[in-house]
């Protein structure tokens, strides 16, 4: 079974600084998707960034970028120029690449605090 | 992006009663919907996967007679917590995907907070 591990329960970053959230996963498959989701206090899950495993290029979305190391099964999220609105729970998630819609497996989450 | 709604957003009920939570895809047809449960300060745990017109597939350890899921149309799935007890109190989140392809993104509802007294 696939597992997703986030080893940092809490992280803190100063506004305008850069922070990196860690995620490792375990799978025997070669093709899959990886995601970072943000869950603010409203509890609404928001997709931050997505990476297809077959793509070597790291995904980027504005201030958010990932460092995808397939051999090491590592998928970290870098937030640049942190803003107060970035404060939230961040979940790393894995999904298989199949012919049909498949379930997400979530990590335990990292709570990010942004300070002035 | 696509919008998924849940109703109610919060509900309080007495122990022993049943509660129904609705999940609707507002601007797309959802062939597959997922139901998650989230305890305070914990991650999302998948409870079941439902496909329109067929029986839901439950994850190991989830009581199918306790958590009844019905995906009667391409825009609506319901989760009924039967004979609710205080330990069923939790945050329930649904997600929906518009396609059958593994590339289809999941869109999440805002969640429903259930409190059983």
Image (cartoon, rainbow, N blue to C red):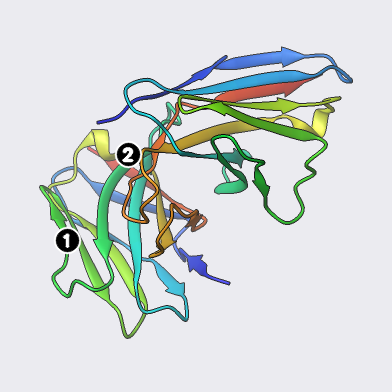
Image quadrant where residue B67 sits = top right
At x 36%, y 79%, the residue is A30
Packing grade of label 1 (10 A; few <14, some 14-19, many >=20) is some
Q: Which of marks 2 and 1 is nearer the N terminus?
A: 1
User: Residue B4 at what x, y percent from top left?
Assistant: 40, 26
Packing grade of label 2 (10 A; few <14, some 14-19, many >=20) is many
Which residue is identified by label 1?
A: A59
Q: Is residue A88 visible?
A: no
At x 36%, y 47%, the residue is A37
Please identify the residue farthest to the front as the structure is shown. Answer: B53
Q: In this view, does A71 lie above or below B4?
A: below
Q: In which quarter of the image is the N terminus of chain B?
A: top left
Q: Are marks 2 and 1 in contact (CB under 8 Å)?
A: no
Observer-nearest residue: B52 or A72?
B52
Q: What element carries label 2?
A: loop
Which residue is identified by label 2?
A: A87
Q: Is residue B6 left or right of residue A97?
A: right
At x 48%, y 66%, the residue is A4
The chain letter under disc 2 is A
Observer-nearest residue: B1 or A75?
B1
Q: Can residue A81 be seen in this view?
A: yes
At x 63%, y 40%, the residue is B39
Observer-nearest residue: B104 or B72?
B72
């Amino acid at each position: 079974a696939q597992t997703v591990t986030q080893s940092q329960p809490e992280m803190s970053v100063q506004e305008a600084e850069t922070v990196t959230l860690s995620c490792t996963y375990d799978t025997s498959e070669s093709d899959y998707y990886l995601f970072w989701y943000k869950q603010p206090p409203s509890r609404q899950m928001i997709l931050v960034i997505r990476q297809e495993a077959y793509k070597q290029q790291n995904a980027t979305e504005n201030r958010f970028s990932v460092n995808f190391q397939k051999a090491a099964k590592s998928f970290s999220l870098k937030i640049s120029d942190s803003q107060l609105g970035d404060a939230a729970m961040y979940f790393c998630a894995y999904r298989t690449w199949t012919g049909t819609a498949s379930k997400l497996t979530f990590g335990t989450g990292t709570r990010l605090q942004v300070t002035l | 992006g696509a919008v998924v709604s849940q109703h109610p957003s919060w509900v309080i009920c007495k122990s022993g009663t049943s509660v129904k939570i609705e999940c609707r895809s507002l601007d797309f047809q959802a062939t597959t919907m997922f139901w998650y449960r989230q305890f305070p300060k914990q991650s999302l745990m998948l409870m079941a996967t439902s496909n329109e017109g067929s029986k839901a597939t439950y994850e190991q350890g989830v009581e199918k007679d306790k958590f009844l899921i019905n995906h009667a149309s391409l825009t609506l799935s319901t989760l009924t917590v039967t004979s609710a007890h205080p330990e069923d109190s939790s945050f329930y989140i649904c997600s929906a995907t518009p396609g059958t392809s593994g590339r289809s993104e999941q869109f999440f509802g805002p969640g429903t907070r259930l409190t059983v007294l």
